Amino acid sequence: MSRLLNRRNMTASPRRCGLPVNRAENGQDVVETALLMPLLLLLLIGVIEFAFIIFTYSSVALLAREGARCGVIADADAADVLLCVTTRVIGPLNRCEGGLTVIPDFAPADIGRDDPPVIDVEVVCDWPLLSGWLAPVIESDGVLRLGSIARMRRE
């Protein structure tokens, strides 16, 4: 008889295993998961989208600096700056709609001043958004314009 009592005590009760005691609670976890999963996926997609945007912006700024650095060379012209920038384009920037826009501007020194000439290089990327839900927030048509201008003086 003592063995039977011990076996009854050894069996797992629903309360000990964390299972619902009430039959009305059986589907509660499934409903909660179904309600929260879309919000969690939306948050995850937003984080990934934001990471792509930050990476693209930093790459565009780097390309503008590289273009200005190439432009301060003594005999560099607009074609040299464009070649310098386009050879340094990395993978994700190939997704820019219409490609990268590179605008070099060689400003001469001011007349009557001893300032050296200045070069401005503007690089613009029209980045297509991965998800459509961000477009109404930034008031665009699904494309985010990322640009940077770098200025250097010829010494």
Image: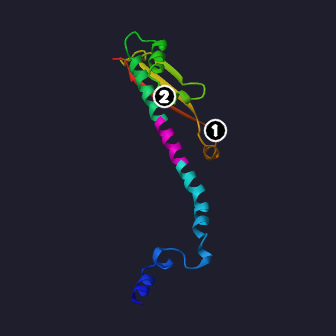
How far across and down, in percent of the image, does residue 149 sit? Answer: 47, 28
How far across and down, in percent of the image, does residue 50 sit? Answer: 51, 44
Q: For this rendering, which residue is in front, 91 or 2?
A: 2
Image side of residue 45 versus residue 10, left or right? right
Q: Is residue 107 among the parts visible in the rendering?
A: no
The residue at the far left in this view is: 155
Residue indicated by mark 2: 91
Q: Which of the two marks, 2 or 1, is nearer to us in this view?
A: 2
How far across and down, in percent of the image, does residue 60 sit? Answer: 47, 30
Q: Is residue 32 among the parts visible in the rendering?
A: yes
* Residue at left offset 61%, top offset 62%: 35
Crowdedness of circle 2 by 10 Å Cα count: few (<14), some, many (20+)? few
Amino acid type of the residue that numbered disc 2 sits on in the rendered structure: Gly
Q: Are marks 2 and 1 in contact (CB under 8 Å)?
A: no
The residue at the far bottom in this view is: 1
How far across and down, in percent of the image, does residue 102 sit? Answer: 52, 22
Range drawn in magenta? 45-55
Would you place residue 33 above or below residue 9 in this image?
above
User: Which of the two labelled residues, at mark 2 and mark 1, occupies the earlier sequence position?
Assistant: 2
The quarter of the picture where the C terminus appears is top left
**Element carrying mark 2:** helix
Amino acid type of the residue that numbered disc 1 sits on in the rendered structure: Gly
Residue indicated by mark 1: 142
> What kind of secondary structure does the magenta stretch mostly adopt?
helix
| In the image, residue 52 lies in the stretch drawn in magenta | yes
Numbered mark located on residue 84 in the image: none
**Element carrying mark 1:** loop
Q: For this rendering, which residue is in front, 102 or 135?
A: 135
Total marks drawn?
A: 2
